[in-house]
């Protein structure tokens, strides 16, 4: 069965933590495709620091030369970017004989029961949770119940079923965040923060050229 995973995010801006983790995940789970899905109008956070088009342009630059792809369907919906709508749209396009997964970090998954139509999620896709050291999951409540019911210790469900499993993957930690990058770009963080080690050179160049996030040459 063909397997496609979607990794949604604000990508404000996209950085090496996103790209390295997504690349490792694709290889580890032998996924046929892993697509980064920049959200247009984020639901769970403040408006991004630059336009949707600019975030999309940076994601396209970042995936060049990697085994990753970009899915820009959320940019074409002029309303809040609900992940469940994105999954539904892709499921309608691909039919039910493809394994679809939604990738998220533990932080996002811990609050998963606040997501729009979260109960419909596992009928449309699997969930892959990227775990980073020190992150804890709820031990009680709806998310804990979901893990108990749908969590899988093996990768087979992701390869053999279209949807319905939750898989945890501990990936190599890559300690960088978009927040730290934005504050370094705006000069609020010490100069020793190495921007060129945190993001693709083409993305940094794009930010500098367009003077995003308060960057000044
Ligand atoms: P911000 O600092 O603005 O909150 P972010 O760097 O966390 O941004 P998002 O676009 O919000 O980036 O992240 C999208 C997804 O990428 C989230 O699920 C998040 O858990 C994950 N992610 C963010 N940084 C890393 C990293 N360094 N390594 C692995 N995954 C990451």
Image: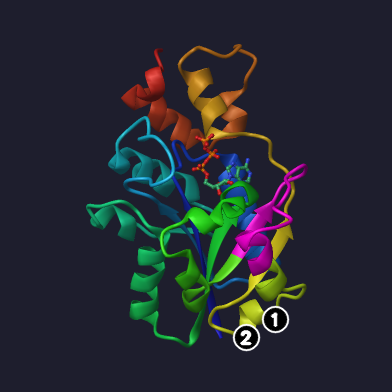
**SS for tag 2?**
helix
Q: Is residue 25 above or below residue 136?
A: below
Disc 2 to disc 1: CB gap under 8 Å = yes
Q: CA distance from mark 2 to mark 1?
A: 6 Å
Residue at (43, 44) in percent of width and height = 44
Mark 2, residues whose alpha carbon is within 10 Å: few (<14), some, or many (≥20)?
some
**Which image quadrant: the N terminus?**
bottom right
Residue at (58, 34) in percent of width and height = 177
Bounds of the magenta span? 128-146
Side of 193 relative to 38 (left or right): right
Which residue in the rendered view is the most extreme toward the front? 141
Please check the rendered image and state whether residue 71 is part of the magenta-colored stretch, yes or no: no
Quadrant in the rendering for residue 214 = top left
Residue at (72, 45) in percent of width and height = 135
Which residue in the rendered view is the most extreme toward the left? 78
Query: Pointer 1: what residue?
Result: 156
Please check the rendered image and state whether residue 129 is part of the magenta-colored stretch, yes or no: yes
**In the image, ligand 1 is in what quadrant?**
top right
Q: Position of residue 30 (x, y in %)?
A: 65, 72
> Total marks drawn?
2
Query: Pointer 2: what residue?
Result: 160
Side of 192 relative to 80 (left or right): right
Side of 24 relative to 200 (left or right): right
Quadrant in the rendering for residue 129 = bottom right
């Amino acid at each position: 069965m063909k397997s496609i995973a979607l990794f949604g995010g604000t990508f404000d801006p996209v950085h090496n933590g996103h790209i390295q983790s997504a690349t490792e995940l694709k290889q580890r789970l032998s996924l046929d495709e892993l697509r980064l899905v920049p959200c247009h109008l984020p639901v769970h956070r403040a408006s991004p620091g630059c336009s949707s088009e600019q975030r999309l342009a940076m994601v396209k630059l970042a995936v060049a030369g990697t085994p990753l792809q970009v899915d820009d369907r959320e940019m074409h919906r002029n309303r809040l970017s609900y992940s469940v709508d994105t999954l539904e749209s892709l499921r309608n396009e691909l039919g039910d004989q493809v394994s679809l997964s939604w990738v998220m970090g533990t932080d996002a998954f811990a609050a998963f029961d606040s997501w729009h139509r979260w109960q419909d999620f596992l009928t449309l896709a699997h969930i892959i949770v990227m775990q980073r050291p020190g992150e804890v999951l709820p031990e009680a409540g709806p998310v804990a119940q979901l893990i108990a019911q749908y969590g899988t210790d093996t990768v087979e469900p992701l390869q053999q079923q279209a949807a319905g499993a939750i898989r945890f993957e501990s990936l190599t930690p890559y300690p960088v965040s978009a927040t730290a990058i934005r504050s370094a770009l705006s000069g609020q963080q010490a100069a020793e923060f190495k921007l060129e080690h945190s993001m693709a050179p083409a993305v940094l160049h794009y930010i500098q050229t367009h003077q995003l996030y308060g960057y000044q040459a």
